[in-house]
Amino acid sequence: MISVTDKKNCCGCTACVNACPVSCIKMERDSEGFLYPQVNTDLCINCGKCDKVCPLLNKTDLPFPEKAFILRNNDAQTVKTSTSGGAVSVFASKIISGGGVVFGGAFGKNYYVEHRRAETEEELKMFKSSKYVQCDPRDSFAEVKRELSSGRLVMFTGTPCQVAGLKSYLSKPFDNLFTVDFVCRAVPSPKAWDRYREFSEQKYGSKLSYACFREKTYGYHSSNMSLRFENGKKYLGNTHTDPYLKSFFDGMNIRPSCFDCAFRQAGRVSDLTVFDCWNITRYVPSVKDDDKGYTACFVQSKKGEEMLNKCSGDLTKYSADAELLVKHCGHMAVQNPKPHPKRAEFFEMLGENQPIDTIINKLSPVQTKHRVFDKLKPVLYRTGLLKLVK
């Protein structure tokens, strides 16, 4: 029987929930807003399937990837609206064109982040851009299995722990499954996101109509939290000034297991691993970085390499040194974030319904230089000085 006695030992992937033959395990939120499995012991038959599929209890070390590339979607508009180089959009489109289905993180009701499915190009748009919130897989693992068993082509994207959880739940390889994981810093609290959204809606006097955690408003290297509201008002904030992003990058609103991530290694169970390439010139001297974004990619399997070959007509691709990529752009693949010393206070104050900006001002105040720079940024961008200053 699965039992979470230490929350550092659970990533909330839902493999145990989907594997339970008597449906006695449910995912429930704790006081910090994170999802954890809860077992109804009255229904449990002690079959042990939940323990057998837990990716943390059955983790394996994987070899360092031999091949790495830097990619960019050949469609300029897709690159503009993507987090980095828009490569994953090409993979997803290839699956859709082959009659397949794609699973990924998307906003649901009240901007709740959950795994959803897409079967058309139009539906793929909901997966665009990063979402710095724990994504609820819901019953996507079971859906994936049903589609695979029917012979349909399936693409699943998610955090490394989610992909590992899916693979463990499936228990056997499927030739028609293609997986992509992304190098993530950590998984933030849905409760913190809810409080932030409520705070923002109250501040701007309107319901949220759009949210992007990394919009390229001032270029790839100066992405912002971008919010839009039904009354037409807009908001932009960066990692140093936005209360939600600051709580994330300062290590306040992060899930406990992320501080000692069991999947924090360059080798992954996915077919491809993607992450940000911050300076392509470092890896490809002949190419000058244009601040529009590139996708770094590790090839983890033959299937991943085949996908890259199939998409060659829609991608600009450069070979890169995998170890150099880890050192300069993919360090989050191998290095854990550190918890903020006042993390417990953050969640305590959040539980008291204190506004998230008030909490940040008390625990980790925004520095004056960052406030000033944030106000000057539009002018610096229009005059072309922003890149020089950064």
Image (cartoon, rainbow, N blue to C red):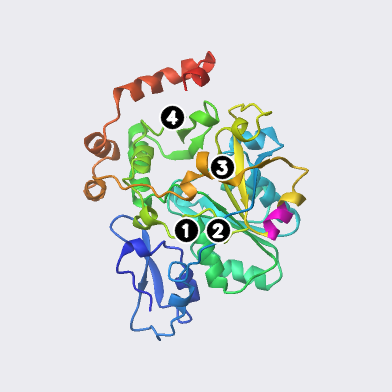
Q: How far apart are marks 3 and 2 (CA)?
A: 15 Å
Q: Callout 1: 10 Å neighbours few (<14), some, many (20+)?
A: many
Disc 4 target residue:
236
The structure residue drawn at horizontal position 30% and vertical position 65%, both measured from the top left corner, is 6
Check the image and report above or below for 189 versus 358: below
Task: Give the quarter of the image for residue 372.
Answer: top left
The structure residue drawn at horizontal position 49% and vertical position 32%, both measured from the top left corner, is 223
Q: Distance between the residues labelled 4 and 1?
A: 33 Å
Q: Type of residue at label 1?
A: Phe
Q: Callout 3: 10 Å neighbours few (<14), some, many (20+)?
A: many
Disc 3 target residue:
325
Disc 2 target residue:
268
Verify CB contact (< 8 Å) between mark 4 and mark 1.
no
Magenta-colored span: 302-307
The structure residue drawn at horizontal position 59% and vertical position 46%, both measured from the top left corner, is 322
x, y percentage for residue 1?
Answer: 38, 79
Q: Earlier in the sequence, mark 3 or mark 4?
A: 4
Verify CB contact (< 8 Å) between mark 2 and mark 1.
yes
Disc 1 target residue:
263
Name the element at disc 4. strand
Name the element at disc 3. helix
Q: Which of marks 1 and 3 is in front?
A: 3
Depth check: give the residue in front, 232 or 106. 106
Q: Earlier in the sequence, mark 3 or mark 2?
A: 2
